[in-house]
């Protein structure tokens, strides 16, 4: 009877050990999958942020070019008006 009890306890302990290893493997697999999902989401978010930053940079560059061109046109207009006023003043002085 004693041998049967020892054998039963040994079989139960072996079963629990196998169950624990299986649970550990499943838990590890779930953690790995979660880690891969997180990594994938972080990479996707990084791409979205990078693309948005590129779009902002392109918009700022375009706005700067437009502003520069507008400043050149304004400068040309002022210079022309100055030349016209100077010519008119010289005509009146004669």
Image (cartoon, helix red, strand yellow):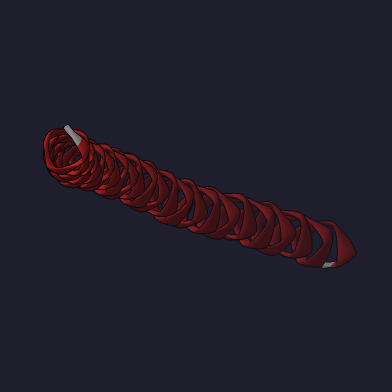
**75 or 64, nearer to the observer:** 64
Figure check: 71 above or below 15: below
> Could you say which is closer to the camera, residue 37 or residue 4?
4
46 left or right of 27 in image: right
- Outermost residue on the front side: it is 1
Residue 26 sits in quarter: top left
**Nearest the eye: 72 or 86:** 72
Examine the rendered structure and indicate whether residue 61 appears above or below residue 37: below
The residue that appears at 60% across and 50% down in the rendered structure is: 77
Q: Does residue 60 lie above or below 45 as drawn?
A: below
Q: Say left or right for 93 vs 22.
A: right
Query: Horizontal placement of 58 versus 81: left or right?
Result: left
Residue 54 pos. (x, y %) = 33, 52
Query: Is 80 left, or right, of 91 in this rendering?
Result: left
Mark count: 0
At horizontal 29% and vertical 38% (from top left) the residue drawn is: 41
- Where is residue 10? Give x, y as percent: 17, 45
Residue visible at 34% across and 46% down in the picture: 42
Residue 23 at x, y percent in the picture? 21, 36
Q: Quadrant of the N terminus?
A: top left
Of 82 and 12, which appears nearest the observer? 12
Q: Quadrant of residue 92?
A: bottom right
| Residue in the image at 27% along x and 49% along y | 39
Q: Quadrant of the C terminus?
A: bottom right
- Pick out the residue farthest to the right: 93
Q: Position of residue 85 (x, y in %)?
A: 76, 55
């Amino acid at each position: 009877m004693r041998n049967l009890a020892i054998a039963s306890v040994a079989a139960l302990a072996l079963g629990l050990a196998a169950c624990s290893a299986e649970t550990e493997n499943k838990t590890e697999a779930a953690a790995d999958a979660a880690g891969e999902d997180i990594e994938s989401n972080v990479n996707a978010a990084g791409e979205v942020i990078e693309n948005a930053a590129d779009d902002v940079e392109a918009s700022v560059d375009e706005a700067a070019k437009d502003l520069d061109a507008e400043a050149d046109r304004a400068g040309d207009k002022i210079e022309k008006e100055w030349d016209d006023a100077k010519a008119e003043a010289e005509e009146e002085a004669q």
